[in-house]
Structure formats: C-alpha cells, structure tokens
Amino acid sequence: MLAFCTHLLLSALSMQSSLLTDDAPVPFGPVPTAAQLAWHDREMQMFIHFGPNTFTGLEWGEGGENPKLFAPTALDANQWARVAKDAGMEAIILTTKHHDGFCLWPCASTTHDVASSGWSGGERDVLRELSDACAKAGLGLGVYLSPWDRNNPKYGTGSAYNEYFMAQLREVLGGAYGPIVEMWFDGACGEGPNGKRQVYDFAAFNALVHELQPGAVIFSDAGPEVRWVGNERGIGNETHWCRLNRDEFFPGTPRSEELGEGHRDGTHWIPAECDVSIRPGWFYHPDTDAKVKSVDALEEIWYASVGRGCGLLLNVPPDRRGLIHDNDAAVLRGLRARLDATFAKDLARGATASATTTRVSTVSPTRFSASRVLDGDASTYWATDDAVHDGAVTISFSAPTKVGIVRIEEYIKLGQRVAKFHVDALVDGEWKRVTEGTTIGARRILRFDGVSATAIRVVIDDALAAPCISSIQCY
Ligand code: FUL
C-alpha cells in the first residue's frame, strides 16, 4: 500500500514538473495525426492500375466487358512487390475496382469480378495475393475503389448504390486483407449503365473507412487526410501548405487549381499527394513499351513532389502477363541507383551548427539548440523564442566541401510554420545566396549549382510562428 501511494505521489510530482518545464512551442494551427505522419514518411508509393482495360486497350472501360477477357498468363504479385521494394517505395495501392466496375477480388455482391474471369478458373484473388506479397516484402497496402461504376445497375439510383459501394468497402477493408495504409477515392463521377449520375455519400464512406481501418489515411480531392495535388503530372507546388480549408472542397471539386498550394491559414492538416503514371496511360498498353518515362524524367518528378514535401504515387501498370514489364522495372532500378548515389553521404553529419537565435529552455540548455538539426533524431529540433519568427542556422565544415543539394525538414508535429527562407554558402570567405524557397513542411529538397563551401547557412526569413527545424542535410 505504501509503495502504491509513493508511486502515485511520484507520478503526480513528475507530471507537475513536466507541465512546469515543458517549454516547447505550442502547436501552430492544425497538426498531423499519427496516420498522416506515417504517410509523410512513405515518400514514394507505387500505384497499380490493372483490370479489364489491360486486355482491351481502353483507359476507361465501359462496364459491359466480358469478365473472361481478364486473363493474365503469369500474374505474380511478388514480382510487383520486388520491383516496388527495389525502387525504394514504401507501399502499393491497387485499383481493386476501376470505373468499369470489375472487382479484382471475388466480390460477394457482384459477378463482375475475378471469380467469373478467364483467370485460373476463377479461383484466384489479386488483392489477396498482393496483400500477402506486401506483408512478405514489408510494404504497406493501399486500396483504390472507384465510386464511379459503369457496370452496376444500381449506379445512379442514390442510396441503393451507396449501400452496394459500402458493402464493397466492408469486403476490402473489413480485415480479410489485413491493415490498409491508404484508401484512395477517385473524384471521377460519370454516368452509369442507366445513363444516370450518382450522388455519393462521402461522409458515410469516410466514416466507414475510419471505423474499419483507423490507421489508414483517406485520399481524395478534399482529403480528409491526404489531398490531390491538382494535376496528374506528379508535380507538387513550390509553395505547399499542408493546410486546407477542407470544408470548402469535395471529391470532384471544380476548385482543383487551389489544391497544389493549399491554404496558408487553412483549417485542416491535409498534405498533397502527386499521382502520375510511368507510361502515357494509367493502364498497360503494348504500344507504350517504348514510351516509359526515363530515369531523368522520373528524377525531375521526384524532386518536384517528394522534394516539395508532397507524397509521390507513381503508377506502374502490369502487362497482360500480370507482370511489370522489364522496361518499367529497369528505369525504376535506375532511379533508385541515381537517388542512392546522390544521397549516399550527408555532408552535414560531423559538421558543427550554430544559430543566430535560440529558444531558451529551462529543461536543458541544448534542448532547442542548432545542433539538433544535425543529430539525426526526428524528435528533436532547433527553435526560436515565440516572439522570434526569423533566424539562421549555420552548418560549418572543417574543410571546403562541395555542396549542391540541401534537405531541410520542419518539426511538423507542431504544425507548418516557415513561409520564406533562403540558403547561403560561404565560398572563399564570402556569403553567397545559392537557393531560396517559401514553404518547407515535412521536407524541402533543393538543388543548386555545386559550390565549394566552408559553411552553409539556412536563413528563415519569415515564419507564421517560431520556426522549428528538425533536420538540415547537405549533399
Ligand atoms: C482518374 C481516373 O479517371 C483515371 O482513370 C485514373 O484512375 C486516375 C488515377 O484517376 O481520375
């Protein structure tokens, strides 16, 4: 009993002292959830468009296709997972049903599915095989399920179709296929087989996804967790606020040109994801084998998406065998090799850091010091006092060092703060500006003409609240 009372007293005292001594900045604006933080860490994910279109050559199937057309000859989801893994991707999102309504898993509520297909006597399940392959490879699994359905007769009838769609969500998200990291809702909404357009109940769809897969983020034009970037070229906006006035948007929004930048004073944390295909179309077509994007083109896309704090969702469509074509696999290996070579050695590790201004902490004098940006620990950061919204961190090398890339990360658990910054290099004893930008967010990766510098200085020119920078890397 005495031990129990002592324990209570000690924990009360330590709670009180941490309240008194927690001199960290208070969060600024909306902040990411745990699921969104995990999404930010999955910098690059693979998108897989596969289905009847692979066999008909269409991009938007009409819905009346004979399921027997779906007949891959050598499908191997482990090969997809290997290609994704070798490319350094963190998850695979599969079109379990595209606009043609055909389901890649044996669906209990329609016969327009793999069970009626010409593939292996209707005995196999693409989602099951991908789920197993991802689990084995240590990849996350995401689900694209098109609300637009050009096959189902209930489409366009209101609640009857919404019920059908939610029954499908229950099948794919209910646990049979394990944890799902991302639910991808397409904003496309056209006519169904009866010529009518459907009014979707996205509030109910989202609530169901959250109930069935609390660890998943939902993507759509309007989030609620991840938003579309507003183009299908894989290009993020140079100014990328992770905040959005969410309630003014909906899937299929006519205001998609605002999605790239987001809103500086937005109400909700909803960062942008950049979807793009490695080929001209979303589905595999044999006449595009020579049109696979080059390593150079993919590298540019990577810097314009991942480098601007967005997620990159790169579509790699399997061919009619059910395998990723060698041309696609080869450029992905090339991209990985290029990125690995570029980012092999962080030149800032081992350098020293100092700041023009540092937040005072009574917990420890180094709690918010400049050295925090070099410690490789994502949970520590350099910060300024609340009233100070600018300042600079200088990274000094022991000898002139050739630098052409900086990677800067904000401590986004406390919100997104930086609105304007620039980077200087100390070359032959003189500071010269090498690059500049607006937002940073989860990360900003900037390339510039390489300089031989004895120091690199990241200058925060303007922030909406005390800047909190968790990492500065140089390559
Ligand atoms: C669009 C769809 O209409 C395309 O077919 C593709 O699935 C793309 C990712 O989203 O809205």
Image (cartoon, rainbow, N blue to C red):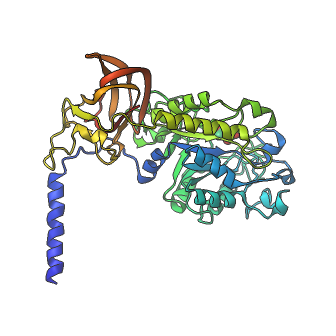
Q: Where residue 416 sits in the image (x, y, percent)?
A: 35, 38
> Would residue 229 appear left or right of 124 to someone viewing this image?
left
The picture quadrant where one finds residue 3 is bottom left
For the N terminus, give its image quadrant: bottom left
Which of the pair 265/387 is nearer the observer?
Answer: 387
Q: Where residue 376 sits in the image (x, y, percent)?
A: 34, 44
Q: Where residue 346 sits in the image (x, y, percent)?
A: 39, 36
Residue 330 visible to the viewer = yes
Which of the pair 342/461 is nearer the observer?
Answer: 342
The picture quadrant where one finds residue 267 is top left
Q: Is residue 261 above or below residue 366?
A: above
Taking the spot 59% from the left edge, 56% from the top edge, the residue there is 137
Ligand 1 image-quadrant field: top right
Residue 185 visible to the viewer = no
Q: Is residue 374 above or below residue 97?
A: above
Taking the spot 50% from the left edge, 42% from the top edge, the residue there is 43
The picture quadrant where one finds residue 358 is top left
> Would residue 232 appear left or right of 401 to someone viewing this image?
right
